[in-house]
Structure formats: C-alpha cells, structure tokens
Image: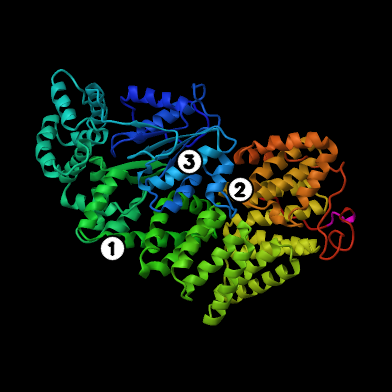
C-alpha cells in the first residue's frame, strides 16, 4: 500500500507488509509523545521494516503526527567509520554543504526550523556516534523527531525504547510465511490440509521474520514438510546451548546457517565473497571482485540467480538497471566465513581495485557527454567507494593508492556537492603518508581546490604551495599546472585580479604544453574569463566565453559550461541586455541544479534576482532570501568578494528602495523558507521580460584601484554593440 505523504525519501514497499499490528500502533503512539524512539531487537527481527511502515504512516498527509518536511531515511548499516555518520545522514537528507563548519553544524542549521521525522536505521555498528548525533540534533532542532533501529538502545536522555520480539502471534507468522511462499511458489496457500505443518515450521523458526522469509524462499524446491524435516540437523549444527545470549539470536544464526548449508559449495563461496560489498552492487562488479578459483566468471550469472532464489541476495531494479543487495545480517554471516577462509584482505583488495577503476572511469568520462551518468552512478556507488577508501587507508601498503583514489574522485567532491566529505577523505589520505609521491601531489592540489571552495584559503594555500614545490623538485609537470591553476582560483575569490589573471594564464600555458584538456582546463578558462571581465575587458571576456562554449559543445561538457554561461550572463547585464542575461543565467542554474552544485546554483539565482528587480522588487527580494539560505550551506556569502557581490548589492539596493525596509525584510524572510528545489523553480519561473529598462542602469565592476565601472566610462554609457553568442544554449 502506498501512502500519500509529504516529501521524504522513504522507499516504496516491494511486498506486502504482514502482521505487527500491535507493534505498529505502539510505535505510532510513542512517536506522538516522544522525540526519540528506538526499536531494538536481534538482526532480522524486522526492525527496519516496521520503522519504515511507521514512518510512512507518521509522515503521510493528514495523519495525526504528520511532519510538514517529511519523513527521511538514513541508512547507517554500511558506515564503518564513526566519522562518516554525520556525512551519511547529511547525504540522506540531500544536504550539500561547502563550508568548513563540518556536517554536524550543517545538519543543525538545516534541521533547526523544520518539522521532520528522521529514521536512523541500523545504528548498532556506530551506536556511540549515532547516539551523539541524535542527542545534538534533538537538542538544537525542536521540530525534529528521530526513529532509530538498533540492536541496543542509544542511551540518549529522553529515549523511548521498544524491544521488538519475534512474531508472538502464530497467525501473523503463518500469514508472513504464506505471503512470501506464494511469491516463491505461485498458487501456494495455507489451508486445512497444510496449516498444522506451516504452524509447526513457524514455531520451529521462532517466528523470526528473516528466518520465515528464507524458509519461504525454499518453497521453489521443497515442500513444507521437507523444509521442516531439514531443520533439526541444521539447528543442532549451529546452536550452542551453553554459549549465552538470547535464544532468538541463536535461532537467527540457525536460520541463516541453515540457508547457508542448503547452498552448493560454489554458492557458499560466492556468498562469502559478496560480503565485501557495502550497499548494493552490479553484476560486472560482482564478476570482477568475486570470480576466480572455484567461482568461474561464466558461472556468475547463474550463481547469483541461485542466491536470489534462495533469498540470500536481493534483486533490485530501477531505471532499467539491475542491482543486488545482501541484507546486513546475511552479509555479516558471509563475512565471518570469508575471514575463516583467510580471504578477507584479498577480496577487499579486489573490491578496492574495482572501485579505483570505477573512479578512474568517472574522472575520464566527466569531461564528455556522460557527465550526468557519471554523477548518478557515483552517487549510487558511494557506500562501496567509502568501503574502498576505508580499506586503502587502514592498510599501510595501500596508503598511496588511497591518496590516488580520494583525489581521482575530485569531480564528485567538487561537481556534485560533496566538498565536506571529499576533504575528510583527502585529509586522511594526506596524513597517512607524507612521502613526496605523485599520488600525494594529486591529493594535495585536489584538497587545496576543495578547501578554496569551502572558503579556507589559508589551508588551501599551504597545500598548493607544498604541491608546487614538490612537483618542481620531482619533475611532475602536471601537478605544477594544477597547483598554479588553483592558486589562481584562490586569488580570484580574494579579489586579487591581476595575480589571478597571471596565474590562470600560466596554468593554461602548462596545460597546452602537456596537451591536457578536461573539465579542470575548461574551468581555468572560465575563471580567466571572469578575471578579465572583472578587470573591465568585457570584449575579452565574451571572446573567452564563446571559445569555451564551442569546446564544451564539441565534447558534451555541461558542468564547466554552466559557469561559462554565468560569466557571459554577468557581462550581458553590464552591457544592458537583460533578456540575454536572464536566458544564460537560467540555463546555468538548470545545469548546476542537475549536478546539485550549490555554488553555481546560488550565483545564478543572485543574478536572476537582480534581473527580476527591474520589474518586480517583491519577487527579487524573495529570491535574495532564497539565495541567502543556500549561501548558509556554501559558506561566506559571495565568497566575501566585492566583484562576485555586485549583483547581490545592486539587487538589494533596488529592492529596498522600492519596498522599504520592512517590505524588503518580509520578502527576504519568505525566500528563506524555500528549500533548494523550490528556490530553483521560483528563480526559473520568475525570469524578467525581454524589455526591462525602466530602472536605474546596472553597475559593472570597478577596475583595480578605481571606483569606475568596466573600461574607462560608467557602465551606463556602455553600448550594446558587443558580440552575443551565435545561438542560445540548448
């Protein structure tokens, strides 16, 4: 059943929710009076499924405890490093933050004014980190409620714990087995002839949902009496009566162990090897990582299908792509066998090698027509990339590979709104191995680049100077080029335009010598165009933007093109062509929104707000308020730059003059309530008309050391005779 609900990210139910009527009512009752509810119980008892059903009910429109900002799921089962818990929750909330304040502060800022239900799933692996985060957020976000699942309570003040037992009602266990068995064996039904057998099977499995589902999956090959007949040996084999711990825990191990015993030797080995994946995975990845001795590549498809049939591996399909997933408990069981076989390190190394290749593919394909695919694919593989990075940075012999992997993902950290997590991994990698290698040089300039965009110029400068000095000493010409380029970026954002221009020109000279052409090189040209235009040479800026556009069209590049469009839009505004400026700025925002690049989005919205001010000061102030909320996630508004801040200051001046102080502040506050998607939609819907010249003329940038606008005359005297793009962007 689908619920009509407010925004959120809860997954749709893949099969019918069976039973748990009393527990569901109790969860909803607790959520009505408590801000933190934790479902505890053994793995496989159904904590996650119950939490998701309760969250969907609580988050649905019209429910007694509906949440205006939705119900959101943060999966922590694949998080191995406590330092990544905050990042994982931020990612689940689709929160991107470019500042140096850290994900915890960003989460507090994001949640402080919202009415939202957050489901923290599978906290047991990082219970201390999850508890610390939950306590911080609950103290500082009064509209937040948290529903957690864990094998133990979080221990946070005010926590209400609901211990989830196996299905106590025999009829619910029978209903669950019948539902799942009918999916495995169409036509199966519980009737008078087999009810006693089914009830016995459910009793022997202690009513544990995972055990029942695994047993139901065997209905493809066995009858109910055959399944029950095999349980005695498997229970005795895997249950140790004197080992301590709850009986239901040993029963779950029995269920999984029994499923393991029913597998062929090849299936068992593949199960163990698949346990190195974090999150879901594709067929090609499984073939590369797991094929080898005793598991030939040509048998992989059939073996995976067999494991899917046995309900060991789950099959997921979205947008025509099939992915596979091991439940956490099943994965842990397989990992135990992998360790017993002495293969854990070798398989984790193969897993890392696959994802190193994946990152290399992404870096290469980022400059081309597959940018959107690279972005979505990398987002989908993030859990596995984290696991690959973790392995590389915990094994000394792999540190340099870890540096290279973290640096190769620059396109994801920078282009897809992951600056904070990117810096986390890059700094860990740099700390792990200080040797002056090529891998370290790449990690240095990438970390410097990330730090600049976060507004941490001091740290960035240190890393970039180290990179350049090391590169000169070791003859690494590529690292010299990238270090010089990013030094230019730092100079641009700090308004040192002559130095920025010189550094960009030097970097581009290095790139030409190297024969380098990629999105970084295009961005160097974009940033040079910005510096040239800010210095007053509008014609030079236009010429550079035109050349960039042609190169991007030739190669299918969209991310860097968006920044070129923004630069060209600013120039069009200075030249009193608001229609062209609005068209280009809107396209820039559309592209950046597809990549979730907050910097590009907010720069474009600031310019669209200014262009709107010429005919609708109220809407312009709303857009400025929306931009203000985005800047909170990016860092220092307009980078603290006088030049990048011109559209903002001019728009505020016009809007305040039209609306008055109180009117402006009301409209600005209204904009601050918009989320990112709403802000973008509003900015694009409010593009100004082609003729909007009834307000005071725009002001361009002042040349260095002068208060005048571009060139030697006021911007208002500039004539609209500059070359425009030959055609509008597609």
Q: Is mark 2 on a helix, strand or loop?
A: helix
Q: Which of marks 3 and 2 is nearer the N terminus?
A: 3
Q: What element carries label 3?
A: helix
Q: What's the mark number on residue 633?
A: 2
The residue mark sitting in front, 3 or 1, is: 3
Rendering coords of residue 725 (x, y %) = 73, 55
Which quadrant would residue 100 be assigned to in this image?
bottom right
Is residue 197 positioned above or below 42 on the image?
above
Q: Which residue position holds label 1?
A: 346
Whether residue 41 is visible, yes or no, is yes
> Which residue is nearer to you in this view: 659 or 416?
659
Q: What element carries label 1?
A: helix
Q: What's the mark number on residue 106?
A: none
Q: Does the magenta stretch include residue 720?
A: yes
> Which residue is nearer to you in this view: 231 or 553?
231
Which quadrant would residue 232 be assigned to in this image?
top left
Q: Is residue 668 left or right of residue 370?
A: right
The residue mark sitting in front, 3 or 2, is: 3
Look at 84% across and 56% down and name the residue there: 721
Q: Which of marks 1 and 2 is nearer the N terminus?
A: 1
Q: Residues within 10 Å of mark 2 (few under 14, many from 20)?
A: many
Question: Residues under labels 3 and 2: Cα distance?
Answer: 22 Å
Q: Name the outermost residue toward the top.
A: 192
Is residue 275 positioned above or below 207 on the image?
below
Question: Residues under labels 1 and 2: Cα distance?
Answer: 40 Å
Question: Residues under labels 3 and 1: Cα distance?
Answer: 39 Å
Look at 26% across and 33% down and name the residue there: 209
Q: Which residue position holds label 3?
A: 135
Rendering coords of residue 652 (x, y %) = 79, 44
Q: Give the range drawn in magenta.
A: 717-721
Q: How crowded is mark 3: few (under 14 residues within 10 Å), some or many (20 or more)?
A: some
């Amino acid at each position: 059943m689908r619920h009509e609900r407010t925004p959120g990210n809860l997954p749709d139910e893949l099969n019918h929710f069976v039973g748990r009527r009393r527990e569901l009512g109790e969860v909803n009752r607790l959520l009505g009076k408590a801000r933190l509810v934790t479902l505890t119980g053994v793995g496989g008892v159904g904590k996650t499924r119950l939490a998701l059903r309760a969250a969907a009910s609580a988050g649905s429109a019209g429910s007694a405890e509906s949440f205006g900002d939705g119900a959101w799921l943060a999966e922590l089962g694949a998080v191995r490093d406590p330092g990544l818990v905050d990042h994982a929750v931020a990612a689940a909330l689709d929160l991107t933050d470019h500042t140096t304040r850290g994900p915890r502060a960003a989460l507090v800022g994001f949640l402080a004014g919202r009415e939202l239900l957050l489901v923290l799933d599978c906290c047991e692996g990082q219970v201390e980190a999850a508890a610390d985060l939950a306590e911080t957020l609950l103290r500082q976000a009064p509209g937040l409620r948290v529903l957690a699942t864990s094998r133990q309570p979080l221990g946070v003040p005010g926590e209400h714990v609901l211990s989830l037992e196996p299905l106590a009602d025999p009829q619910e266990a029978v209903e669950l087995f019948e539902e799942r068995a009918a999916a495995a064996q169409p036509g199966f039904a519980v009737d008078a002839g087999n009810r006693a057998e089914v009830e016995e099977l459910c009793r022997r499995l202690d009513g544990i949902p995972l055990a029942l589902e695994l047993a139901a999956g065997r209905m493809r090959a066995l009858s109910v009496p055959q399944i029950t007949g095999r349980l005695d040996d498997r229970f005795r084999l895997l249950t140790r009566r004197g080992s301590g711990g709850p009986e239901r825990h040993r029963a779950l191990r029995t269920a999984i162990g029994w499923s393991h015993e029913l597998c062929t030797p090849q299936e068992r080995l593949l199960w163990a090897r698949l346990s190195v994946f974090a999150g879901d995975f594709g067929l090609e990845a499984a073939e590369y990582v797991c094929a080898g001795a005793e598991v030939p590549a040509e048998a992989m498809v059939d073996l995976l299908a067999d494991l899917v049939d046995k309900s060991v591996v789950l099959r997921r399909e979205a947008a025509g792509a099939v992915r596979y997933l091991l439940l956490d408990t099943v994965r842990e069981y397989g990992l135990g066998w992998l360790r017993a076989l002495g293969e854990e390190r070798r398989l984790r190394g193969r897993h890392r090698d696959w994802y190193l290749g994946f990152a290399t593919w992404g870096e290469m394909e980022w400059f081309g027509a597959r940018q959107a695919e690279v972005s979505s694919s990398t987002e989908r593989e993030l859990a596995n990339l984290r696991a690959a990075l973790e392995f590389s940075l915990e094994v000394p012999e792999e540190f340099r590979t870890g540096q290279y992997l973290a640096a190769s993902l620059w396109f994801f950290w920078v282009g897809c709104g992951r600056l904070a997590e990117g810096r986390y991994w890059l700094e860990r990698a740099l700390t792990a191995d200080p040797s002056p290698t090529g891998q370290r040089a790449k990690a240095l300039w990438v970390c410097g680049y990330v730090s600049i965009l976060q507004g941490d110029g001091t740290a960035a400068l240190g890393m970039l100077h180290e990179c350049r000095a090391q590169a000169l000493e070791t003859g690494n010409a590529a690292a010299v080029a990238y270090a010089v380029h990013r030094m230019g970026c730092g100079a641009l954002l700090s308004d040192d335009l002559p130095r920025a221009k010189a550094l960009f020109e030097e970097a581009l000279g290095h790139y030409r010598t190297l024969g380098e052409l990629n999105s970084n090189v295009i961005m160097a040209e974009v940033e040079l165009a910005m510096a040239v235009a800010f210095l007053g040479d509008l014609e030079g800026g236009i010429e550079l933007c035109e050349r960039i556009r042609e190169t991007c069209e030739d190669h299918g590049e969209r991310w860097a093109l968006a920044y070129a469009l923004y630069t060209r839009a600013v120039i069009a505004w200075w030249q009193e062509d608001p229609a062209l400026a609005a068209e280009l700025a809107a396209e820039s925002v559309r592209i950046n929104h597809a990549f979730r690049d907050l910097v590009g989005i907010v720069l474009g919205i600031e310019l669209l707000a200014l262009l709107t001010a010429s005919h609708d000061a109220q809407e312009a102030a709303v857009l400025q308020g929306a931009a203000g909320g985005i800047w909170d996630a990016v860092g220092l508004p307009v980078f603290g730059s006088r030049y990048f801040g011109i559209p903002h200051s001019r728009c505020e001046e016009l809007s305040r003059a039209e609306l008055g102080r109180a009117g402006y502040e009301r409209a600005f506050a209204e904009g601050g309530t918009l989320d990112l998607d709403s802000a973008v939609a509003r900015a694009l819907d409010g593009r100004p008309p082609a003729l909007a010249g009834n307000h005071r003329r725009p002001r361009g940038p002042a040349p260095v050391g002068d208060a005048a606008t571009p060139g030697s005359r006021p911007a208002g005297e500039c004539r609209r005779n500059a070359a425009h793009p030959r055609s509008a962007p597609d």
